[in-house]
Amino acid sequence: MINLISRTISQISSLLKGLQIKGFLAVVIVGFLVLTTNVSDGQNDKGLKERVREQVEQNDAQRPKTVGQWFKDARETEGSPGERLQKIGQQSGEAFKEFGSGYVEGAQKTAGDVGDSAARTGEKILN
């Protein structure tokens, strides 16, 4: 009976030692990753803000480009729903036209890339 208790205590003790080593290694690896990883929160990146603003203001469309501009436009036409619907229709038309031009440009570029890839593949097959 004493032998059984002794073996049980021994097994529990070795199990706990194994867990302590694994836990220690996990803490060391996590600490290493935290200390060696360069993390930037991007709060002080003024260049990014300016680049985003340039992208937003890039097109010459007369429709609102930001949520603030959209709400301002809605406040200006708050009393007349007909005028508001007319503006929404015009702005939607501009948006679809802009989307369509971007779609056409993307499709043309993709078609050109596919053509170039096919030509390169044909050359490789002939060689």
Image (cartoon, rainbow, N blue to C red):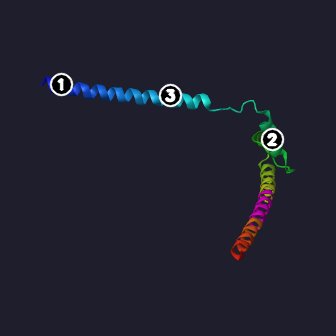
According to the picture, the residue beneath numbered tag 2 turns out to be 51
According to the picture, the residue beneath numbered tag 3 turns out to be 28
Disc 1 element: helix
Taking 76 as reference, is 34 left or right?
Answer: left
Q: Mark 2 against mark 3, which lies toward the viewer? A: 3
Q: Nearer the viewer, residue 102 or 92?
A: 102
Q: Say which residue appears at 73% left-offset and 69% top-offset.
A: 120
Does the segment drawn in magenta span residue 101? Answer: yes
- Dominant secondary structure (helix, strand or loop) of the stretch shown in magenta: helix
Residue at the far right: name it: 60
Which callout, 2 or 1, points at the residue further toward the start of the chain?
1
Q: CA distance from mark 2 to mark 3?
A: 40 Å
Q: Say which residue appears at 75% left-offset and 30% top-offset.
A: 44
Q: Which quadrant holds the N terminus?
A: top left
User: Looking at the picture, does residue 17 appear above or below residue 90?
Assistant: above
User: Looking at the picture, does residue 8 appear above or below residue 92?
Assistant: above
Q: Position of residue 33 (x, y in %)?
A: 57, 32
Q: Position of residue 101 (x, y in %)?
A: 80, 60
User: Looking at the picture, does residue 117 appear above or below residue 42?
Assistant: below
Q: CA distance from mark 2 to mark 1?
A: 71 Å
Q: Amino acid at mark 2?
A: Arg
Q: Position of residue 90 (x, y in %)?
A: 81, 55
CB under 8 Å between callouts 1 and 3?
no
Crowdedness near tag 2: few (<14), some (14–19) or many (≥20) residues, C-alpha within 10 Å? few
Crowdedness near tag 3: few (<14), some (14–19) or many (≥20) residues, C-alpha within 10 Å? few
Q: Say which residue appears at 36% left-offset and 29% top-offset.
A: 18
According to the picture, the residue beneath numbered tag 1 turns out to be 5
Q: Quadrant of residue 113?
A: bottom right
Q: Which mark is residue 125?
A: none
The span shown in magenta is 98-111
